[in-house]
Image (cartoon, rainbow, N blue to C red):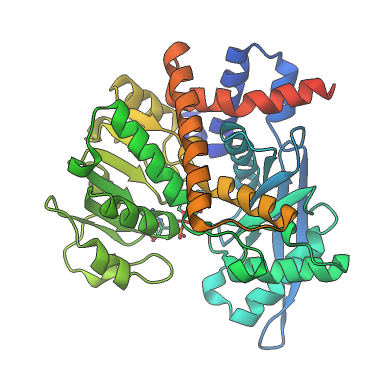
């Protein structure tokens, strides 16, 4: 590999996920065959979806569905609509879903889907036709006991409702457990929309206890002000923390005295953009290096790398986004004794409440928001504790510990089934 290829390899989330899985399986004493099984999804479907556009033309979209491993149970994971979706990204995300399901001990393997499209350039009805077309294209391999989709980047409860309706028409019966993240009236769960941020908040509280930090005195920076970042800003602000920095794709705001979170929440648009309203902003790169106690990347991949990890001032980094820290970034944070709560643990609240939604659909009996939150808290604290203790007892970093916890059940189930 030449220098340029080495650089690209470091930023390749799929390659880095495979590396950590290999390390986790080696540490747990599994043979290489187990890694060969787990390094790729067991099933990967690519589909072409013709959609009649509003101007009468037909556009053909490409979509994917990856199912990583179904030894434990049906696969589960979101569908993203984004121009930058790639097959590789969908594969990596399906592996992360397996790890998350393992960490919070759900009876699922990981799945993920995506469509290459720009929903910001599409009308409401075009989005409906695309969502229905995707379900028709993947209907053979999904279902409430096979593979259960959910929302992800740029998909929401309306899109889940169209997908549910299309699936129910194909199967000729109502099947609410086919998909999660639905509107409440169609069998959605209370607390689903804010579940990821809720789970991240629980991890932040647990991490603060370990570091002897009082959340009410803590200064927090949140990168990204979308679904995850904005709910998180609200929860932390409500918990008494001082949110000193936030950002979106266009810039960042920082005030050591604390930002006016209520104003920012009120003014953000549905894509999580708010900094355009301000004249004085800084770059996202600058924001990550500002003074704070807790840093939460909640935007995109490869934000903390070997180039900036030495400059991070926080004593706790909690990854709400998927893949925001490279392997080299992780090593530097760990060496500097910064407590890193990795993505596969911190952002597992979303899939946990999706699981609660599916359980409620299966039993036809629905829980209150308080019940959902209580159950989520118990699951997240248990997951945090097992990862933290494994990291300490095996003297490994938090990411490797989370992968070890996440992969163990799936590996055991694959072994019991006689696959390996
Ligand atoms: P979103 O699309 O709602 O919001 C993304 C936010 O990040 C927006 O404010 C956007 O302006 C900002 N952003 C984009 N690129 C940026 C950049 N380079 N620098 C700074 N800000 C940038 O997305 P979301 O649902 O909030 O998800 C954010 C991250 O959290 C993603 O990595 C996602 O995979 C992960 N995540 C989200 C959920 C969930 O339930 N929403 C669950 C698990 C993981």
Q: Quarter of the image holding residue 276? A: bottom left
In screen coordinates, is 100 left or right of 250? right
Q: Is residue 369 above or below residue 70?
A: below
**Quadrant (top left, top right, bottom left, bottom right) of the C terminus:** top right
**Horizontal and vertical percent for residue 130?**
69, 71
- Percent x, y for residue 183? 60, 68
Up/down of 199 relative to 51, above or below: above
Work out which quarter of the rendered image holds the N terminus and state it.
top right
Is 409 or 403 nearer to us in this picture? 409
| Residue for point 63% across, 56% down | 150
- State the residue at coordinates (67%, 26%): 409
- Of residues 273 and 175, the one nearer the viewer is 175
Is 34 or 417 nearer to us in this picture? Answer: 417
Which residue is at 57% across, 35% downward? Answer: 104
Res. 202 in view: yes
Q: Position of residue 64 (x, y in %)?
A: 71, 54
């Amino acid at each position: 590999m030449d220098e340029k290829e080495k650089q690209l390899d470091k930023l390749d989330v799929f390659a880095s996920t495979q590396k950590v899985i290999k390390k986790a399986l080696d540490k747990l004493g599994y043979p290489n065959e187990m890694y060969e099984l787990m390094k790729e999804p067991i099933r990967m479907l690519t589909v072409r979806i013709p959609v009649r556009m509003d101007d009468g033309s037909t556009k053909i979209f490409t979509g994917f569905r990856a199912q990583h491993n179904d030894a434990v149970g049906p696969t589960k994971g979101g569908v993203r609509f984004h121009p930058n979706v790639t097959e590789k990204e969908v594969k990596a995300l399906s592996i992360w879903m397996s790890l998350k399901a393992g960490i919070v001990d759900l009876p699922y393997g990981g799945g993920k889907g995506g469509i290459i499209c720009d929903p910001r350039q599409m009308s409401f009805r075009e989005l409906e036709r695309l969502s229905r077309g995707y379900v028709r294209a993947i209907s053979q391999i999904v279902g409430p006991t096979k593979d259960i989709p959910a929302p992800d980047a740029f998909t929401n409860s309306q899109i889940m409702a169209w997908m549910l309706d299309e699936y129910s028409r194909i199967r000729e019966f109502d099947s609410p457990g086919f998909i999660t993240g639905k509107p409440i009236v169609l069998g959605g769960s209370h607390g689903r929309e804010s579940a990821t941020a809720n789970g991240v908040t629980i991890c932040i509280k647990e991490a603060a206890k370990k570091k002897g930090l009082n959340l009410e005195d803590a200064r927090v920076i949140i990168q990204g002000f979308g679904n995850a970042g904005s709910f998180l800003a609200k929860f932390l602000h409500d918990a008494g923390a001082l949110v000193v920095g936030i950002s979106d794709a266009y810039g960042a705001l920082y005030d050591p005295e604390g930002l006016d979170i209520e104003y920012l929440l009120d003014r953000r648009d549905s894509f999580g953009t708010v900094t355009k309203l301000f004249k004085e902003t800084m770059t996202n790169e600058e924001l990550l290096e500002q003074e704070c106690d807790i840093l939460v990347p909640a935007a995109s991949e490869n934000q903390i790398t070997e180039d900036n990890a030495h400059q991070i001032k926080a004593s706790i980094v909690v990854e709400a986004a998927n893949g925001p820290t490279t392997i080299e970034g992780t090593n530097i944070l760990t060496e500097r004794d910064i407590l890193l709560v990795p993505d596969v643990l911190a952002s597992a609240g979303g899939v946990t409440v999706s699981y609660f939604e599916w359980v409620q659909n299966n039993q036809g009996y629905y829980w209150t928001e308080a019940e959902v939150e209580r159950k989520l808290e118990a699951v997240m604290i248990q997951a945090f504790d097992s990862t933290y203790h494994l990291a300490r007892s095996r003297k490994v970093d938090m990411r490797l510990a989370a992968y070890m916890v996440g992969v163990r059940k799936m590996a055991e189930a694959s072994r019991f089934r006689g696959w390996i």
